[in-house]
Image (cartoon, coloured by chain):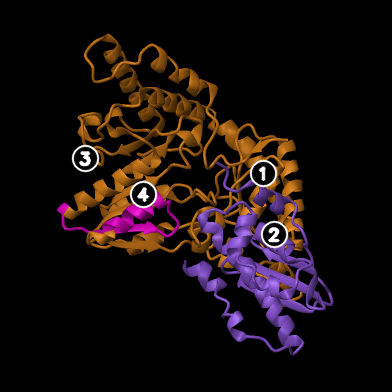
Chain colours: A orange, B purple
Amino acid sequence: MQIYADNAATTQMSRTAIAAMLPYMEEIYGNPSSLYTIGQKAREAIEDARERMANCLGCTAREITFTSGGSEADNQAILSAAALGAKRGKKHIISTAFEHHAVLHTLKKLEKNGFEVTLLDVHSNGIVAAEQVAEAIREDTCLVSVMYANNEIGTIQPIAEIGAVCREKGVLFHTDAVQAAGHLPIDVERQYIDLLSLSAHKFHGPKGCGALYSRRGTPLISVIEGGAQERGKRAGTENVPAIMGMTAALEEACRSMEAHTAHLTALRDRLIHGLEKIPYSALNGDGTQRLPGNVNFCFEGIEGESLLLLLDDKGISVSSGSACTSGSLDPSHVLLAIGRPHEVAHGSLRMTLGEDTTEEQVDYMIEAVTEVVDYLRHMSPFWRDLEIGKRPHVFSK
Amino acid sequence: MALYSEKVMDHFRHPRNVGIIEDADGIGEVGNPVCGDIMKIYLKIEKDIISDVKFETFGCGSAIASSSMATELIKGKPISQALQLTNKAVTEALDGLPAHKLHCSVLAEEAIKSAIKDYYDKHQIAYDHSQFPDCKSCGHCCEE
């Protein structure tokens, strides 16, 4: 059985999105900046797409900037808010310890340029409270950036409440909605969002394409120079096919959101209940305030990369927050942020289900994970130490 | 190119010499759970020959493969030869490891040395202490 359960990493493109792209590769391939017909047709297409994207988010077309993806949108949102803040002598930014690196690394860069960054602690259930934001806001705070849903543990943040706090205090609010767009409702008005980043390939659109919403009156600075595209805020010939694919994918995802949420939530909970039966394991992040397709577990006594590779042998594609898979020597900063000790964070597994996932596949995954965890524990000296009481267990049986 | 060579995947999927030796003559353990890898080597020694060897490993694919290969390389060999085993030899036998995984082969070398040292200590056999530099494996992997 082949099971793709890494939909938080990327998704399969939808037929609708592919179909929406093809005409702009085969026929209407003109440069939207060109004045002749196939150029202008491409221009019309992306302006129409901008309007439709805006409808999905509850904003106006002028407030949408197309980017190369979520990371670029995050960079541009934060750097723009920082530039605006600096002009007003406000150089304090609030964010959280478990943001995506596109946010954290941009903040690091700003720290080197004289900004002060407060990273809020994350509660052990993977959620940041609006009260924490309210308490952290200062006179010189120019931006609050809190992700809508976490990319590893899927926990959903109280975005509307945080937005309301920011609006009341007159501070710009950015949310990295890369994991949320197409999966959770977005209404930038009701949620008091000033800046929002999204990425097409997380909701069955193409890779290398994203969008940044910026509320009217929140001027963007250009991160990529060299042309007047996107009202001078993002140089480079527009990726017309990708923009068309992203728009079609987001519309489709928003239309089907209710049905998908019901389907995925049922499967997610089935998977959680199945994996909870493995002794000395624990779900990471809140059990209900999480993305409908996200399951993330830690298993004591084993290491995530070997777990991932053995599951791959069984046809299951998943990811892990172990150091060995993170490309660094430390395990996932998200798992550390919610208080998981290093040795447990190394044994994490993220399974993110998709709309095509079936109950049968979930049952197969439960069986496979249970078997592989057991196998790896039997060759683990760390597990032996836990079993004989030489080291203390972290989780209960 | 895949992350790991065919050899690494073979030893990872079908690790040789997994287990413990109840009446081991020497046991060596290196690494720690915070770093994400621990290797434990059990030796049975008869007339200076490693007559049996088993391992237990907590770690990633290359850690398991390195332990498996290292045990294969010393099984049936005289202690003097096992002491000569380098992480480079383990890596080469595995047809290479990704650069950020080389520390796994270092752990394997150190685990074997540690087990031999334990054998010497337990059996009160005199040895040259310079052969067994302090185990740096943990610092090695966490501070690299």
Residue sitting at 59 percent across and 57 percent down?
A284
Q: SS class of the residue under badge 2?
A: helix
Q: Along the polypeptide, which appears first: circle 1 or circle 3?
A: 3
Marks 4 and 2 sit apart, C-alpha to C-alpha, by: 56 Å
Q: What amino acid type should be assigned to the residue bearing mark 2?
A: Met
Marks 3 and 4 sit apart, C-alpha to C-alpha, by: 17 Å
The label shown at residue A312 is 1
Q: SS class of the residue under badge 4?
A: helix
Q: Quadrant of the C terminus of chain A?
A: bottom right
Disc 1 and disc 2 in contact, CB within 8 angstroms: no
Disc 2 designates what residue? Answer: B69
Q: Which residues are magenta?
A: A87-110
Q: Along the polypeptide, which appears first: circle 4 or circle 1?
A: 4
Q: Nearer the viewer, mark 4 or mark 2?
A: 2
Considering depth in this image, is A30 or B101 the residue closer to the camera?
B101
Q: SS class of the residue under badge 1?
A: helix
